[in-house]
Amino acid sequence: MEKTETIAENARAGFEPRIVAFVCNWCTYAGADLAGTSRLQYAPNVRILKLPCTGRIDPLLVLKAFEGGADAVLVSGCHPGDCHYTSGNYHARRRWSVFGKLLAFAGIDGRRLYFSWVSAAEGQKFADLINSITKEVRSAGPFDPVNPARRRT
Amino acid sequence: MARVGVFICHCGENIARTVDVAAAAAAAAKMPGVVYSADYKYMCSDPGQQLVRKAIADHKLTGAVVAACSPRMHENTFRRAAAAAGMNPYLLEMANVREHCSWVHSDRAAATAKAIDLIRVMVEKVKRNRGLRTITVPVEPTAVVIGGGIAGIQAALDIAAGGKAVVLIEKSPSLGGHMARLSETFPTLDCSQCILTPRMVEAANHPNITLMTSSEVESVGGFVGNFEVTVRRKARYVDPAKCTGCGECWSKCPVKNIPSEFDAGLSRRTAIYRASPQAVPNQPVIDARHCLMLTKGRCGVCAKVCPRGAINFKDADELVKVKAGAIVLATGFELWDHSAYGEYGGGRIADVIDGFAFERLASASGPTAGEIRRPSDGAEPKTVVFVQCCGSRDEKAGVAYCSKICCMYTAKHAMLYAHKVHGGRAVVFYMDVRSAGKGYDEFVRRAIEKDGAEYIRGRVSKIYRRADGKIMVRGSDTLAGTPVAVEADMVVLADAVTPRPDARTLARMLGVAYDADGFFSEAHPKLRPVETAVAGVYLAGACQGPKDIPESVAQASAAAAKTLGLFARPKLEREPIVARVNRITCAHCRACINACPYKAIEDFNILDRSGKVIRVVANVNEGLCQGCGTCVSVCRSKSVDLDGFTDEQVFLQIAALGPEESGVKSRGSS
């Protein structure tokens, strides 16, 4: 009971979204590094988890992130044709087009899952992306893992 | 029980300005499994590294997290320090609190909270890290050089001089590339053939170089140290072992009206031909598209006159597999096709030619034996207009970049023209003159001041042929602010330098990146200009971007040095991040085998004692696996896992980000 109250208080005090970003090592991680070296400011709500390739990012990881309290998840890798491992991002793209539909079917808001290509040269794109996602998630409100579709019972 | 040490770097003020490092160190000390936590001004400095080494030894650490800059910057530094202290280097991880935190946020409280989160995530990961050993793979000390122009020749000669074997692959029937077609070279005006042909012969005769002309790369497999290149050796219909290059065949060939590629269409060749009299190897090939015997089944004159019986009409393409440790890409460039410029005649005016055609006109071995004659009627042009930036620096119809070499070769053309046609008028239209390089600007000044080339700053808006045969060139002089019209006899367009259209196909075969224009991308524009992002694949010459001859040669030698450096090691060390299969749960559905981009997963037979196959499972070949993890997420029975990025580790990392540090429980159970 206490926890619920804390969350309610947080919501009243001003909701700060938690965004988990699964990024590939070669493009988006380096793009985020470039945002850093260019000193581009973006919202501090994102936590980057590095994986070798978007091909490694299992839908299960996304579900775990939601289960663990993330309000939104970003998956980002190399542009089509630029995958360090030739084709991992194509596997990812196919997977997300299906998985996104599944989440929508389960009633989960489209503002919860984002998929993007950010290259090692796109520091600005990474910063803009995080800012726009943070804004959208702020408007969507906190994610409730018990009742993700927020159906009234 | 895990014993993790956390080391937080101030990076001078870079991290400490926005992250409260002392608070982060205190928070880290309370994380489960952490037995040591410290912050220091410069962790990467010698005393900083000593601090890490000492703590690892004193506190018997089983894992370490360095919260500092990006792992791209100093992961190797700290892993070496860990190894020096007796810890397996793969038990050390970095939390990126500089690039991903202190540099991108200004709110100190939020940045500190985020830094603590990032540290907690890595502490969770490192607790489940396994000590890994680098994988060693043998190196095949043979280099494949793709492209037989000056860059490819130089790279091949340098590698061969280092005592290693080279396979030099050239698409056309002869070595030499574009440089063999040039008349004279800037800024010294030495004859291109005189400096190039000895190198072509040297490359062809070198005992360490295997020359494959009329050959193209069909596919590339493998990885650094162990590439397998499949080469298509195209049918030549002439047996190179028998042919002496006597020339009986091409002097008797009845098909004589094929525009010569080598002479930019200014002369005609036969169906059995050699590219030029200086071709290496100096043996003809049959052009199957034009040969009467091969297209219509009758003729065969060349076979009748050949004294050695070298003609073989039944010759067919052949696929040759080459094992190589390194690949040098030297595929060169092409000139942009100016027929896209309708206002310049759209390529339909015979006397509006490109730079290569002018080179052939000016060349002593060219169709006019070095006399400047215009293509339409063979008359000596009294006025020649040179137009720079044709297609370059034009985002709309051409390319956005500067082609770099045109300012110099146009000045050379104007100079050669003045030397050969006395009293002739050379007019150069330019946007800017970019002549940076040793002796380059002096060269352009010489063309203007000594040889009287008229330089007009401005773009040409229209080129057309008047009824009396004169070619009108209309443009503007942007310095004088007036329109200009020149009556010319010939126009030379300095077309943009573009990558070869098939370069992208080759890049995809190798996994090499290319830029928006189609030039191959280097691994780092400043510090790794010769390497590509693919280990063991190097770049030389204009396939990477517009380059002149000295730059191409310099890069080719650099690529050769990189290749020889790679071959100097008998074995290669590789990151041990590879996938592993749980043979007990694997159901052999083959999903991972189909998904693997490296064909690194194969069937593995489990035998009983009598040697009978009782079960088949997937097995990862460590030498081939690159550690992308695509197999992990396609596995339906969760039987594949990736070292360093196991499901368990990522789940714990995710959980470490939950509210109240254990998100799985907090909201789910309330």
Image: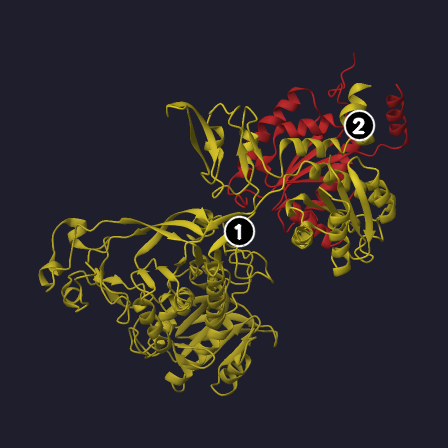
Is residue B559 visible from the viewing direction of this image? yes
Identify the secondary structure beneath mark 2: loop
Q: Which chain carries label 1?
A: B
Marks 2/1 in contact by CB < 8 Å: the verdict is no
Q: How crowded is mark 1: few (under 14 residues within 10 Å), some or many (20 or more)?
A: few
The hue used for chain B is: yellow
The chain drawn in red is A
Whole-percent x and y of residue B328?
44, 59
CA–CA distance in space, label 2 to label 1 = 47 Å
Report the mark closest to the observer, 2 or 1: 1
> Callout 2, which amino acid?
Pro
Helix, strand or loop for disc 1? strand
Question: On the image, which quarter does residue B252 sit in?
Answer: bottom left
**Which residue is label 1 attached to?**
B573
| Of residues A134 and B574, the one drawn nearer to the viewer in this rendering | B574
Which residue sits at x=13%, y=60%?
Answer: B302
Instruction: Look at mark 2 in the image and give the residue it sits on.
Output: A142
Residue drawn at 41 percent across, 69 percent down: B355
- The residue closer to the viewer here, B390 or B201, is B201
Extreme residue in the top direction: A153
Side of B76 relative to B35 (left or right): left
